[in-house]
Image (cartoon, coloured by chain):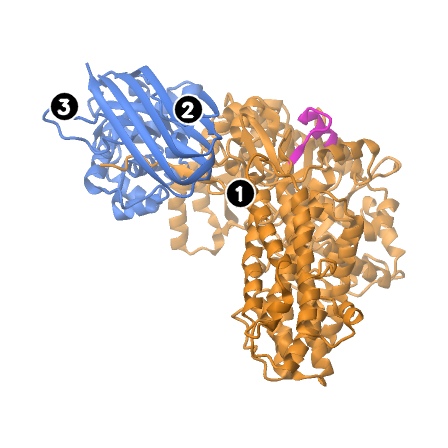
Amino acid sequence: MTAPAAEPFAGSIELTRGYRVHLGHGYDELLNASGKVRSHGLGLVSGLQRLDAGELAMRARRLAQRVRDTGLTYDIFADPRAHAQPWRLNLMPLVVSSAEWRWLEAAMVQRARLLAYVLSDVYAEGRLLDDHLIPPELIFSDESYLPAARDVINGTVGLRFYAADLARGHDGRWRVIDSHTETLAGIGFALANRVTHTHVAGDLFNQVNARRLSPWFRALQEGLNATAGRADARIALMTPGPQSPDYFSHAYIARYLNLLLVEGNDLRVRDGHVALKTLEGLKEIDLIVRCAEGALSDPLELGGTAFLGPAGLLGACRARPDLVINPIGAATVQNRALGARLAQVARHVLGEDLKLADSPRLWLGDPAARAEVARAPSGYTLRAAQEGTGRPGMAASGIELRDLTGEQLDRLIRDMQVHGTRFVAEQRQTFSTMPAYDAGVLVPRPIAIRLFAARTGDDWSLMPAGLAMTVNARSAVSLTADGGETHDVWVLSDEAAGPSSSLWRPTIERARVERSQRVTQSRVAENLYWLGRNVERADWTMRILRGTLRRIEEDSGAFGGQQAAARCMALLLGDDSPALVATGRADIEAAARVLADSKAGRSLANTLASLYRNAFLVRDRLSQEAWQQLSRLAPQGTWGEALTRAPPIALLDLVEEGLGAIAAFNGLAHENMTRNFGWSFLNLGRRLERAYNLAEVTKELFGHADASPENERAGLLLLLELGDSFITYRSRYRLEPMLPLALDLLMLDETNPRSLAFQLAEMDALLERLPHGDAGQSRHVDRRLILKLLTSIRLCDIEQICRDDSRNSLTSLLDEQLAWLPGLSDAISQHYFNLTEALPHRLETRVGTRP
Amino acid sequence: MKLEINHRTTYRYDQPVALAQHRLHMLARPTPLQTVLRSRLMIEPAPTVRADAVDVFGNAVTSVEIERPHEELVIEAASSVDVAPPKAIPTSAGPRWNEIDAAIRELDQKEALAVRQARCMSALTRAPAGLVEYVVTSFPDGRPLVEAALDLTRRITQEFRFDVTATDVSTPLGTVLKSRRGVCQDFAHLTIAGLRALRIPARYVSGYILTIPPPGRPKLMGADASHAWVSVWCGKGLGWIDFDPTNGRLAGEDYATVAWGRDYADVSPITGILLGGGSHVVTVGVDVKAVP
């Protein structure tokens, strides 16, 4: 059903008129049943009415731009072919009155306490495991229930984080459609939404006197420190890694709360203690905020296919039960089937009625429930009782039984007799609507919201904000939002606004903590190293593109120049590139296009995508300005989009702009980054990449004996241009380019920051400064290789090499470099990034294999 | 019967293992019929850290960390146990299989929880398509549980082939059912999955059987290696009774129990997480003998 076009509103037109026309008969968050603005919405509406249509459109555009700049838009680590929906944030917030919020907070806190109690009970005494309360099979069939965690959860406070998805039915009552106890459930998205939205709606936010987030997060941070048990504790957020759809949220919240962002393989359990691998050695971790699935958090004791936590983590938790929060095994209480039992459990445990109930559903482990579903299937949607918690909006949509044929239904009912303990049948849920700003008008959209609660001190509190998301009201039974748009949630305050201060605003106390925490994680070093390599690779690729495009544009010069450029492009594109035996200008132009935006080999598009990923991973190590320079090159940004469409003439301008951004980044990194180990790795990556590219192109252009003098001259001009040494050459020699002189400048001259020797000497110095670890051992492979590389270049006699017309001497000199440089990269990676030589793997015996 | 068990496992690695963490379920546990007289676990190279504990199912579990680089790992477990002969059970004894719910209600709450956990499918015992159809042949309405379970046990022995090449540690049960081939671990999982599909409590037992058969009796399948079978809860009076689907019989005093759990993953004899090591060759020697 598509709504007819509504008239755009301007300041003079009543804002809600067009909106009212399209409203259905359900519950609307802004207007009441008689079409009047609800009293808590008046502040926002009057604020909006002061803005004219142009202003609103401008704000919507700026918001979309901000969402892109923050890195929220695309899951940049996802498989690009998977075509994920972009993250969208609507200009209109959902406003919640202070009275309603008080009720929601009380209701959410009641649920959190209750689930915390249930968690402790099902892992210890099991007094609630009774057919009248919670059927034991409901818990024991849930594969997130981990018997091995019994003696761990037994000793803890249990839950510390709880999130829930709520929908308001047409009857006006909120119901819980899903609970989340396994991870932080995308809290970072909610925070990022707020930070982003405030940039375009901060004035309205202040006008309506909505509650700020920082006091809540400060309390949360203090709570974490208290749990960790010491003042300068090392607290880690354990993420499954960049491939996780929730990774943005993990990275964002870790940065905000100043937690170390770690993956399972960064950690090691040793004699009951968890340590983080850093360049300075193993450092003890005091507390782990778990955002990885519990069942995969200890490959040694819990098995599983993925290694999301360090081997032995559960054992370490036995010694220190509060080491991991939420505790491993906590997912059990987010089981959907459990939700249907909570009302009875609340009466039994708390002696209270459950304020906020779950949406109606049946647990299919119960024969009576199966009979009911078989009798009237069309009203139900079948879903797994247990589903992981990830990115908001990613809940599976389930099977709508009305869509099944009779035969399919029969088979399903039979299957449920065997497997029903792990499934629920959901009754369809109705959703309230809220206004969304859409191309100049307000339109009603059905929504569900996610709220986040945490045990910040001795008790639970609800984050005074949330995430609203549009859903497909016809089919959704949970926060399933394919292509859904998000809204910030504003909670009105009864109190006068106090001074605000973001957690990002540093204080002296915090600064001290941070400084003591600053260790260089091996993985961060690795990301910085690859950032250095990719920045340099992007620079080099754009230089080749620029050289090519200039030569096409001039067209007057020798064709040899274009051909040399084409050969350089062919190097980057690899064997699967279209034929680059260029025979004319058109071919070369086409090749430039391919280099700019294809997915072949080291195309610019590939390099920029990697560059942006690496930059995102180390964003907290970069200054705001440095990050801005790199984010200009983001694949989905304005510049990146233009690059894929631009005709050659415009391509040249774009390339110049890109080179400018990289030059600015390099300048900022050089001027502003602390000279710590992180900086060393960024620089190592850049030096190694530059050395390789230079050696590779030199070999391509001058490694063959067949060049005519004219082509050799064209090649030298290109090489000097790529190596940014043309001016130096001219001022030094005042001669036409000659091979020995040019190669001396670009290979051997250690005062030329673009020369091969300079890169090698720098790497030698950088490696010398890094911690060596086991001092007793002989030189590490990386030190031996750099010495070989440097010595080979320093000892060579360039004049003699150039006199060898067969070019064999030059080729063998460069071949050595091209063979050893990748070896050096591997050696650096083995020495510093893994701390051990390989990823962990599993050893298993099989029983009864010998007859 | 007094049984002496010696189980020696040697891993030889291609490349040095830089760091190894192991969890071992190798020392015999006590059971209502089994007394552990002695048990000892020898590990070479000597672990940097070693902790002996009892896991959530009451099994002995040993956790070790070995930090020194090693190219060979030897784990030798020696246990001496005294196994009482199971009481002779008429197969008609105990509850009917389809009255198991009523039988469970006779237990107190704590006992009932352990039994009810055992009727829930775990990751390795999810019933594949077709298994219920295969199993129900042994379970007509009203048949006594012991008789039905023994019938299933025998059918699996007769209709499945012991074949070490047919499956590996990750072969899904559906493949075992289709190919009618596997080893004792597969047969135990298949039996457990079938029983649990009918809501009958069953658990996975790992242990050993006597290597040298008494004179005149055939040598059993699964001797000379660690073995696995199935324990079925047969009502309050009979309790847990052990069935061996690899050999089509009830377990006797020639069966030494090491550990039990929901499935293999709970009681895997040796699990390890290694850094380095490359590929490995494993040699296993199991010697079980009856002593006077």
User: Helix or strand or loop: what does disc 2 sit on?
Assistant: strand
Residue type at tag 1: Glu
Using the rendered image of the protein, determine whether residue A640 is visible from the camera's viewpoint. Answer: yes
Mark 3 → mark 1, Cα distance in angstroms: 53 Å
Q: Where is mark 2, residue-wise? A: B61
A477 or A295, nearer to the observer:
A295
Tell me, by letter, which chain the rendering colours blue. Answer: B
- For the residues bearing labels 2 and 1, Cβ distance under 8 angstroms: no
In the rendered image of this protein, does residue B46 appear above or below residue A463?
A: above
- For the residues bearing labels 2 and 3, Cβ distance under 8 angstroms: no
Q: Which residues are magenta?
A: A221-236
Mark 2 → mark 3, Cα distance in angstroms: 32 Å
- Closer to the N terminus: mark 2 or mark 3? 2
Q: Residue A313 has which mark? A: none
Q: Chain of mark 2?
A: B
Camera-side mark, 3 or 1: 3
Check the image and name the residue furthest to the left. Answer: B216
Bin the neighbour count of mark 2 within 10 Å (Cα to Cα): few under 14, some 14-19, many 20 and up: many
Q: Name the spot of residue A772 as percent of width and height, x first.
A: 62, 39
Q: Colour of chain A?
A: orange
Task: Indicate left or right for A409 with A188 as reference.
Answer: left
Q: Image quadrant of residue B184?
A: top left
Q: Chain of mark 3?
A: B
A507 or A701, nearer to the observer:
A701
Q: Where is mark 3, residue-wise? A: B214
Q: Residue A387 has which mark? A: 1
Camera-side mark, 2 or 1: 2
